[in-house]
Image: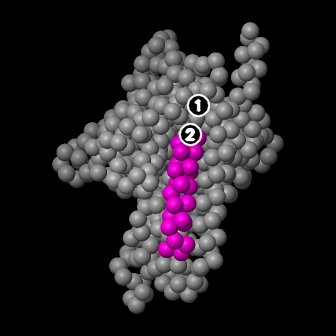
Amino acid sequence: MSVKISKKNENQKIGLIALVAIVVSSMIGSGVDGLPQNMAENSAVGPVVIAWLICGFGMFFISRVFIVLSNIRPDLQAGIYMYAREGFGPFIAFIVAWGYWLMTIFSNVAFAIMVMDTLNYFIPGDFRGGNNIPSVIGASILVWGFNFLVLSGTRVAGVVNILGTFAKMIPLIVFVFTVAYFLNYNELTKNIWGHSPEFSHQKLGSISSQIFSPLDVALWSFIGVEGAVALSGRAKNKKDVGKATFIGFVISLFICILVSILPFGIFSQSTLSEIATPSTAGILKSLTGDWGEWLINIGVLVSVLTSWLAWTMICAEIPMVAAQDGTFPKKFSQKNKNGSASVSLWVSSGFMQVVIFLVYFSNHAWLAMLAISALTVLPAYLMSTAYLFKLCITGEYSKYTNKNSTIALVTSVIGISFCLLMFYASEVKYLTMVPILLTVGLPLFIWSRVKHFKDKPIFTRVELNIFIFLIMLDILIIILFMNGIVNF
């Protein structure tokens, strides 16, 4: 009997193509179809190009961090969490795992809002805004539908994800080639920095402010580059994890840049900034007619649903792996007969359901979910790059590979710098939510430590200092909020 189960679980392993599809699906989600308007909202084409170069450069090194770590430490399953544990202990690992788990939950709720809002194109008035009562009902059905699909096994979900990934690329390819065909080079270059009085219909800020403005949108587009690493425990071949990360990153970066930049050769910055979401639909409609808008909206549905599936798979994996070593309660580590992280998945879906109910009361649900998701993923990126940095400066790097550590060290330094830059460029009202969101999960960590490690202290001395600092930071943020200095 045990042999049969083992073989069945082995069949649930994910190959290279499926891993690439997960990376691309995670990155090319709901955000890509809104990029023309989102990137042009407060920025001209020149600053947008620079913003993409900065974010692309930084995320290239973040992806390189994951590739290097997955190659030298293939033993660390679901590496996005395990890297933090190996480098900095269980408390930091919990913060990373909890923050990353929250990110996947908020991202999936953002997908739910976008799906319902897009359905409003086909059924006008019924799903307006993506967070009214019909939208809440529809989103809830989809949450539990994905729950049961992933419960059937990661291999089944992976096959569905591959098909969906190829399907959602078709509208984007049509969009890129159509816009490229109609592109006017003079329109593209006539107001590069947004400061030409004869062409500017709105006052844009300095070049630096125009560069910083779209960075959070660009970061949102790159979230998911670590998707193959998060599911590394499911990979048939551990070496495929690094390959999938690089291939998925290059494909996604290329598409995002083209979708963002080419429309500046059709419309002015001010016109692009006013196009309704998804802006790719409005642009294609103006060039080809109604069928173009219809195609993009179908593409949005396929794109978001595919990304939602990929993130549901990742969402269930992180708590399960964290539970295996006691950082999360052991209950989360349970799997069903198909090898799926059943308890973790049920709890994750339950949390998504609660957040979906809450967004009913929000006026800017989509933007809030996007901003929170982008920020809660940064601790995971920062700690992974910091772990590689630690391996290099302590000499531990040579224990796992014969390669020189210089390139890895440079990679980690650039990755850390990029993470800090993204924190700096974030809006204060969302940035101040991060410590509070991280603190909310601490009772789960304390409960797990008390239950599974009765003979050990809950915190080490260093961890206790970090815990106290986090609590003090929360108190400060609450005081600032009560005095109207910070608004959520």
- Report the span colored magenta: 286-310
Question: What label does residue 150 carry, if any?
Answer: 1
Q: Residues within 10 Å of mark 1 (few under 14, many from 20)?
A: many
Its colouring scheme is one colour
- Which of 92 and 171 lies nearest the eye of the viewer? 171
**Rendering coords of residue 269 (x, y %):** 44, 76
Q: Residue at x 74, y 9 (%)?
A: 1
> Which secondary structure, mark 1?
helix
The amino acid pointed to by label 1 is Val
The answer to if 274 sits in the magenta stretch is: no
Left or right: where 131 falls relative to 9: left
Q: Earlier in the sequence, mark 2 or mark 1?
A: 1
Left or right: where 199 falls relative to 179: left
Q: Residue at x 39, y 70 (%)?
A: 274
User: Label 2: which residue?
Assistant: 309
- Which of 79 and 458 lies nearest the eye of the viewer? 79
**Residue 241 shows in this picture:** yes
Left or right: where 3 falls relative to 60: right
**Rendering coords of residue 486 (x, y %):** 26, 51
**Residue 416 shows in this picture:** no
